[in-house]
Image (cartoon, helix red, strand yellow):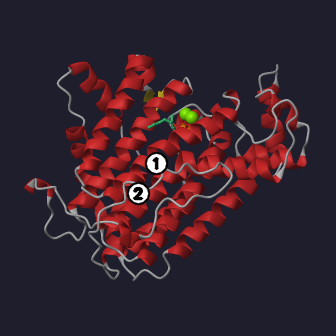
Amino acid sequence: MDPFQTVAKEMKFLTKNIRQLLGSGHPTLDTVSKYYTQSEGKYVRPMLVLLMSRATALTPKIPRDRSPYSVNRPITSPSILSDENPSAPDAEYPSISSTIHDTSYRNEDSDILPSQRRLAEITELIHTASLLHDDVIDHSISRRSAPSANIEFGNKMAVLAGDFLLGRASVALARLRDPEVTELLATVIANLVEGEFMQLKNTASDERNPAWTENTLTYYLQKTYLKSASLISKSCRAAAILGQCTPEVVEAAYSYGKNLGLAFQLVDDMLDYTVSGEELGKPAGADLELGLATAPLLFAWKDNKSLGKLVGRKFSGDGDVQRAREIVSESTGLEQTRALAQEYVDKAIQSIAFFPESDAKKGLIEMCTKVMKRRK
Ligand code: FPP
Ligand code: MG
Ligand code: MG
């Protein structure tokens, strides 16, 4: 059996439900904010949330403490070179009270809770909002094999539509009535911005005299966590929290998402070098053009110090992009990137090894294989 079939019914209603969350009385805003829901996205994040919800449904449950959530806890922002602990122990937080009463939303024969299905939609809204903003920042011309929203409607409307998606995602999140889940997903939004800022700066080293150090890779991986793995890991964690799972299961869900998310972005950065724009559905080779040094180049740089000069000037010199591409293709940078992605994928699978066997667990494992095999 196809392990993804286990969530096929939920996936079928996803786009329709997302479009309902995005309705606006303003016809232009309505059109712009729904623009990326017209094309078929990969829906990686909702699929992971649904699979995680079903896979953890079979694990032991704990009624969660209803003691008031501490409003005095400081809002922490991780220091850029440290890992982060996104949440305090589970027992401090109140349990979920599902507030989704829409009967059409219920699926009585499913062990996925309505709140978990809504969470899946929220993750896609946040992801799509980040793409709307990202395409403005990256001056992108295409996405999902069509003109990107900034090209179709202009920068101002693309940015505002992204903000609108975040607003609607926040409303849907608030309606889940779970402060810990709200905190997790709100932190994701902050993390996306932190990751994007780290990327603007690009490396940990002094730009006037860039040198390869161990910090270069650490900085890149921290940026990658914030930019890509934060949403995947914290939404997997939130799915387990909504399912009233034990702390051990919540941690495992988070670890799975974090490792898969890191692998996902490493592969993304590899595909930017190896696959044509036509196949990707968006411009290929964009990272160097944007001045970005990603994993394949960082590994190549470790062995070929002449890349430092090019990194320092963000590949803006005549022929820099072409030269950097040649050095990367003559190096083992792409192989090393793939090997690192494989290490993360192995860790993701290891994290959920103790989950009871199920089609949903097989689906989570299959997602890892798919990430490594994907070409778009
Ligand atoms: C795609 O990366 C972009 C992201 C994963 C995150 C972008 C985040 C922001 C723009 C921060 C602000 C956003 C929100 C929602 C607050 P990419 O450019 O490497 O990939 P691409 O090739 O798909 O464009
Ligand atoms: Mg981009
Ligand atoms: Mg970008």
Contact, mark 1 vs mark 2 (Cβ under 8 Å): yes
The local crowd at label 2, few if under 14, some if 14 to 19, many if 20 or more residues have their Cα within 10 Å, is many
Which residue lies at the image location 19% right of the left edge and 61% below the top edge? 98
Identify the residue at image location x=35%, y=27%.
161
The quarter of the image that holds ligand 3 is top right
Answer with the quarter of the image where residue 58 lies. bottom left
Residue 114 sits in quarter: bottom left
**Residue 258 to residue 273: above or below:** below
Mark with earlier residue (1, 2): 1
**Residue 259 found in image quarter:** bottom right
Label 1 or label 2, whichever lies nearer to me, is 1
Instruction: Say which mark, if any, is on residue 29.
Output: none
The type of residue carrying mark 2 is Ser
**192 to 312, vertically: above or below:** below
Question: Is residue 110 visible from the viewing direction of this image?
Answer: yes
Question: Which residue has dot 1 on it?
Answer: 188
Quarter of the N terminus within the rendering: bottom left
Q: Which residue is mark 2?
A: 235
Report helix, strand or loop for mark 2: helix
Q: CA distance from mark 1 to mark 2?
A: 9 Å
- Secondary element at tag 1: helix
Residue 145 visible in the picture: no
